[in-house]
Amino acid sequence: MADRLASARRVVERERRECGDEREAFRAFRRRVGELTPTRVPATRRAPRLRHTDGSLDSVREAYEETVMSVPHYDREYGDGYAQSLATEFGNDVAAAVFGSQTLTAELQDALTAAARSAATDRAEFLDLLDREAESVAVADAELDELRDDLVALDSTPLTDRGFDELVELRTAICHVESRLDRVAARRQATLSAHRRTLPDLDVDVTDYLYADHDSVYPVLAAVAAFGDLVDTARRRVERAIASTP
């Protein structure tokens, strides 16, 4: 149980680090594109088709590769090229405008900076969710540790050495542990529901995304269930002892 939640906490921490890197990368890309001087298109009834490039779109590509595509985890998590990444992050329309143009116009510059701002905002919102997830897992981990300690303490005296009244009191104490465990599960369920409300357009459930490689995509609830089995076993042992006590 403890190992499961420790692993979950490491997953969330890694995701927070990577998401933060991406947020800063998109912010840096936006600044660099915003500092470029766009090409001024003559304001005629029909603008002449540009016959040459001025290198401004090369500067856009260089900025993208040196920011967004240079985060430490890029190759491991994405591994795609400039064109595919641009379409994935900024949408097909912006990507088509970039690859269908010969120079950086003011309109294209605005589209790129707006798309970068949106991508950075998306990461910032996900970071907020990850902060709440990290806190939820940490709190649940601490609560389960406390409940485990309490359950061990309740088992300090063999059942055969306890009288009837002591066994009844012990059962009541174990039931209290069960009630506290139920509250841990309820708070976790509330957190998961809040995640879904926060990012309703996410393609997959947050837990599916974060914990896909775990033995359960609900590590906290799985740990609660595993500990619940121990508590249930302890209660039944006491109930059997009560039933057999003269």
Image (tube, grey):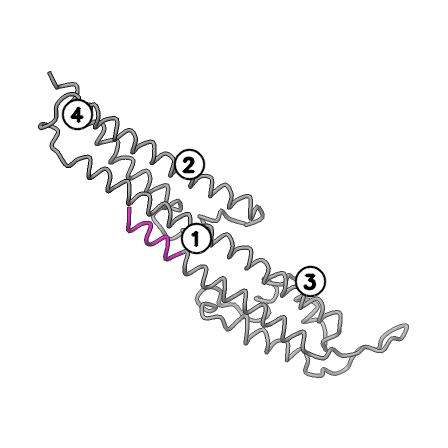
Query: As rendered, which of 222 and 160 lies closer to the eye?
Result: 160
Q: Residues within 10 Å of mark 3 (few under 14, many from 20)?
A: few
Pick out the residue farthest to the top.
246
Cα separation between marks 2 and 3? 44 Å
Q: Amino acid type of disc 1?
A: Leu
Query: As rendered, which of 84 and 33 lies closer to the eye?
Result: 33
Percent position of residue 236, x then y? 21, 27
SS for dot 2: helix
Q: Nearer the viewer, mark 4 or mark 1?
A: 4
Q: Nearer the viewer, mark 3 or mark 1?
A: 1
**Could you say which disc has been placed on residue 114 in the image?**
none
Q: Nearer the viewer, mark 2 or mark 4?
A: 4
Q: Which residue is mark 1?
A: 210
Taking 174 as reference, is 127 left or right? Answer: right
Nearer-N-terminus badge (2/1): 2
Q: Residue at x 21, y 28 (%)?
A: 170
